[in-house]
Image (cartoon, grey):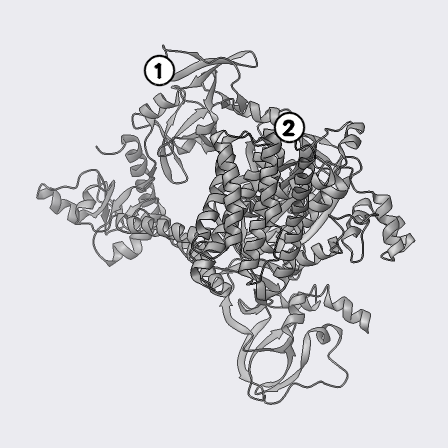
Amino acid sequence: MDDLLADFIAETREMLEASGGEIVAWEADPADRARLDAIFRFVHTVKGNCGFFDFPRLASLSHAAEDALADCRAGRRDPDRALVSAVLAIIDRIAQMIDAIEADETFPEGGDESLIDALNVSRETSGDDGSGAAAPGGAQDEARAALHAPAAALLERGEGSASPARRTDPAAAQRTIRLPVELLDRVMSGVSDMVLARNDLAHRLRQAGNQPTIDGPFERLTTILSDVRDAITRMRMQRIETLFAALPRLVRDLSAELGKQVMIDLDGGDVELDREMIETIRDPLTHIIRNAIDHGIEAPSVRLAARKREIGLLAIAARQSGNTILIVISDDGRGLDEGRIGDKAVACGLVSAAERASMGREKTLNLIFEPGFSTAETVSNVSGRGVGLDVVRQNLERVGGSIKVSSQPGQGTVFTLQIPLTLSIIAGLTVEVGGQRFAVPQSYVEEIVQAEAGALDLVEVGASALVTFRGRRVPCLMLADVLGIAQGGHAPEASAPVLVLLRLASGDLFALAVERIHGHGDLVVKPLAPAVMRCGLYAGSTLLDDGQPVLLLDVANIAAQHELVGDARARALHALDEETARRSETLPRAMLFTDFSGRRAAVRLELVQRIETAPASAIDRSAGRPRVVIDAMILPLVGLPDTPFDDARVRLLRLSDGACDLLYAVREVEDAVELADVLQPVPEDPLVEAMTLVDGRPVSLVDAHALFARFGEPPVPATRPLCALPEGEWARTILGPLVTAAGYDIALSPLAADAGSARVQIVFEDVFEVAETLGRAPLGQVIRLRDQPDAPPGSTTIYRYDREALVAALTAARRGAATTGEPA
Amino acid sequence: MTNDLLVIVQIAGRRCALGANDVRSVIEIGAITPIPRSPAWITGITALRSQALTVIDCRMALGFTGIGWPTDLRAAVVSGGGHAYALLVDAIEDITTATGAPGQVPGGFGAEWSRIASGMVETMIGPALLIDLAALLAGPDTAGGEIEAAA
């Protein structure tokens, strides 16, 4: 095919797909100028492009639609329902013609005139109400006939994708090349290996300490690598939005056809998956939506009688979980009829009556995926075209996916599709339990809460635990119990677990109690061996920076195993609650704490990176302002009391403005709260932004700007004090390790300038004496060694094999250095 | 083929042979991360460069439990079904060539061995049991049951 023509087809397709949602929105509100403009642009572009090719029918159709829309834009006529339907019919016809052009088929003659007439009929009726009383019916019929088109087109596409000869990528870019998928796979796995190699290198560099000559290029490498990785990932990945974009239109058409009112709610459109996978799930998804509207959602009158909202809700949410994508399709319709499904299955001979009696509800419901099963008593135009849910399941299983259903009578049905991702790099959180680390996909993590005594009310009801989180009771799983591993031996920490609040694709929230959070980062997820996957607890494995393999938890499955997934999806029923929740989310939120002077204070939640617990020994108060060493970084510390305190550990809020980190010492962390009350400025205290009331008690809000202006500084890696050694093999190989073990770095050369900056110098007595005589005695702390075991009286030297005395001297020197602070 | 290269290993005190083409490398086993709630014959995962290997204890995978076999610090890395595995064995002995085609022995190899054996093969250093890798990697829980059911 001519390249130019291919471009034309691809571009038109892309616009068709993108405008699907626009059209439905325009229909809902014909006065919406922005939508009108978008659709006008579409037909205008099609008309313009047709000029290059010889497509008179396309040109006349788009021209007619453009004229009608131009009139609306100019205010010469008002867009009404009939006009919208007529324009939609034309757009559908354009889509069909494009398909035909691409397949190099001739499109059946005729029919165009009636579509174009429909536009004008509508104009006449809107202009003159009396004369065309019968005409709108005609236009309606015409439009309705056209409305069957998309369903037919979808079916056709399904067949098309089955035969590889006619595989089309509707979202092909304007300028494209064709590449074998294996090549892309190879490049992609190469890049993910590069990410791992980089992580390994980063780890080694950290161990080796700061090396400006290497760190610079390494930073550049990191940036380039992440760019390349993004690009490569995009090469194969597509946002699921491209699939979602067509759904509003599909739902609109189907519900109009079936006389139902359905609202669609799409969530997670930014989840990316393999292009090919998107094509694979297009048909199953369409099928399930069709089923939901046809069988699930009741007619408006039935819904009203059942005290439901007249408009049915169809919610579709996508979530990424390790190597899989979850797509949850839920409706709030009448739900599946367990009894009828059971009867039908027995009648079809799928199960025996005895088997049926012993089957649980969930198992019975999932019979609908068995081959040869269809409950619809009347086969309607929409569903039941012979493609059953068994085919849906087959198609999904072919690509390594799965499908499940759950339903509550009268409340709705939830279909959960699980599809694999060929490769993924996901953001993950590493947690620790029983001394072993596990990763959790970041996309599930709603919030991390330190379970302070009293802050989270952890109660055990029967065998299950519940926590109270923002006024809601949330089920809580102990990760150690889930995995059957013993809690780590560190009793004090084990008593205050960290809770990771996870939100499932179904909208259900639960807490996972772990011992410690390690951090988060990009994880390259590799699949696990099938025997390991069968445990149902893990979604993959990944390597941490230090090369340690870590298992990625399959959050969705763990929740399902513990029956934490609401059967009838809470989301559909609590849509209103969510709205109110969303409204309250706009309130500023802050972390409430009590500081060391007993004052209740708060700091804006956005600033709080995490809550650290540091031993008191990590705090250095010698140099002007206190600092603390956390993760081998020296960070400024504020909020300490002036008087010494005797707690062995300090709770610290780690605040960050993006570039600088500082730690705020607090006596007790209370909770994250919403600042609903008035913020009263406090000009007297520069470090307080405002006073406000939380639960009727005054709280001072820390002024982050002033805080960072005064104390913020970029983190400095903690360095060990330097020690200069005497020259010679003995010092390097025998003395050196001892000095290193005592907590020193060895100065590279005893003569070089950096020996001058060394905290401590070790010199032999004879060398020292010579230097002293020359008036060049070393500055700072000096440890003098002698060769003989017996000391001359009054000597401050140490025998060079007197290990204990050496270690004591080195320790004393280090402590001395710490108290005198950095030499200016 | 009589001149196939074989990697000779000791599993549960018996001499076994792996096709050298199946064995990608022999590595020193480092730290193994255990996998909670996985079958006992899966020791854990370990890292080989940027790859995660599933570590399999061959003795357990055969169904021999409770006997303290010596374990070689080295493991044979094999791949099956697109996944890489490290096989823990008593000892990795040698690489040698087969001197005859694999054959059966009268009376069979015994229940545990039959499941994973594709035959006996004569090698330069004596007879060895030729291992069917796919059957070994399937573990004792699945295929074993089927064999029993079929028997």
Q: Which residue is mark 1?
A: A686
Q: Position of residue A337 (x, y in %)?
A: 83, 42
Crowd class of label 1 (few under 14; some 14 to 19; many from 20; radius 10 Å)? few
Q: Amino acid at mark 2?
A: Asp
Number of numbered discs on residues: 2
Q: Amino acid at mark 1?
A: Pro
Relative to the observer, which residue lies in front, B144 or A758? B144
Q: Which residue is mark 2?
A: A129
Q: CA distance from mark 1 to mark 2?
A: 71 Å
Q: Chain of mark 2?
A: A
Contact check, label 1 and label 2, Cβ < 8 Å: no
The residue positioned 49% from the left and 65% from the top of the image is A180
Relative to the observer, which residue lies in front, A169 or B77? A169
Q: Is residue A458 visible?
A: no
The residue positioned 34% from the left and 50% from the top of the image is A208
Q: Chain of mark 1?
A: A
Asked if A6 appears above or below A498 in the picture, the reply is below
Asked if A633 appears above or below A374 in the picture, the reply is above
SS for callout 2: loop
Dividing the picture into quadrants, the one containing residue A712 is top left
Q: Position of residue A160 (x, y in %)?
A: 62, 60
Return the residue found at the far front. A131
Which is more N-terminal, label 2 or label 1? 2
**Label drawn at residue A282:** none
